[in-house]
Amino acid sequence: MTAHNDRTRRPFVIEEAVAILSRTPSTLDALVRGLPDGWVAANEGGDTWSAFDVIGHLIHGERTDWMPRARIILEDGDTRPFEKFDRLAQFAESEGRTLPSLLDEFARLRDANLRDLASLPLTEADLDRRGRHPELGVVTLRQLLATWVAHDLDHVMQVSRVLARQYSDEVGPWRAYLRIISGNQG
C-alpha cells in the first residue's frame, strides 16, 4: 500500500495543516465556553491540567513557539537554537484571568499567526530547511508545522478526556465501551 492510499498516515500539506489549525480555537471555544467553573477547573488528578490550563498553554505557544521558531528556521537555519519552551508558563500567565478572556486571546493570536504563516511564500525547499531544537537537535520546518497540528489535536483530545473522565464513576458498566474513559485503544 502506498503512502497516498494509507488511511493511517498523510504527507504534510500546508493547506491541510492550516485547515486544522484554523479550527482549533473555535473547537475549544464550543467545547468549554460557558461550562460551569467546576468543569473548567477539573483535571485528572495530581499535576494534570484542566481545560483552563490547556488554553493558557496554547496561548503561550502562540506567543513563543510555533511562528517564532518558524522565523528562526527561515532566517537563521540551524545556526541559532530555539529558545527553550516553558511548558508550565500558563500557570503564572493565566492567573487571575477568566476562561472567556483566554479563549478570545487564543483565537486572536492564532488568527494573527496563521495570517503571518500565509504571508510567507513557502516552497517545498523551505519546508525542508533546518532549525535546532534545544533538546531534540536538528528539526525541519515541515516537522515543526506538522507538530503544531498534532499538538493542537493532542490538546483537543486532552480537554475532551478531562471532561469525560469527570463522569468516570457515573457511567457505570458503560465505562467498558468508552475509550475516552477506559483508555482502551479502538
Image: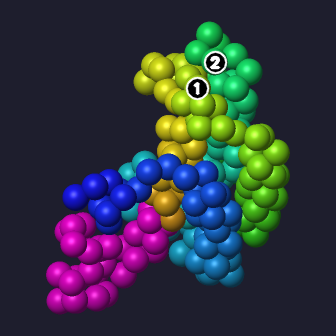
| Disc 2: which residue | 77
User: What amino acid is at disc 1?
Assistant: Arg
> Which image quarter holds the C terminus?
bottom left
Is 160 on the left or on the right of 55, as rendered?
A: left
What is the spatial separation of the Cα atoms under label 2 and label 1, in whole angstroms?
Answer: 7 Å
Residue in the foreground of this view, choosing between 69 and 143: 143
- What's the magenta region? 157-186
Look at the image and tell me whether residue 54 can be seen.
no
Which residue: 32% across, 54% down? 3
Above or below, 26 against 77 in this view is: below
Query: What label does residue 164 carry, if any?
Result: none
Question: Given this view, does label 2 or label 1 mark the residue nearer the observer?
Answer: 1
Badge 1 marks a residue whose secondary structure is: loop
Quadrant in the picture for residue 34: bottom right
Contact between marks 2 and 1 (CB within 8 A): the answer is yes
Which residue: 68% across, 63% down? 22
| Disc 1: which residue | 129
Is 56 on the left or on the right of 115, as rendered?
A: left
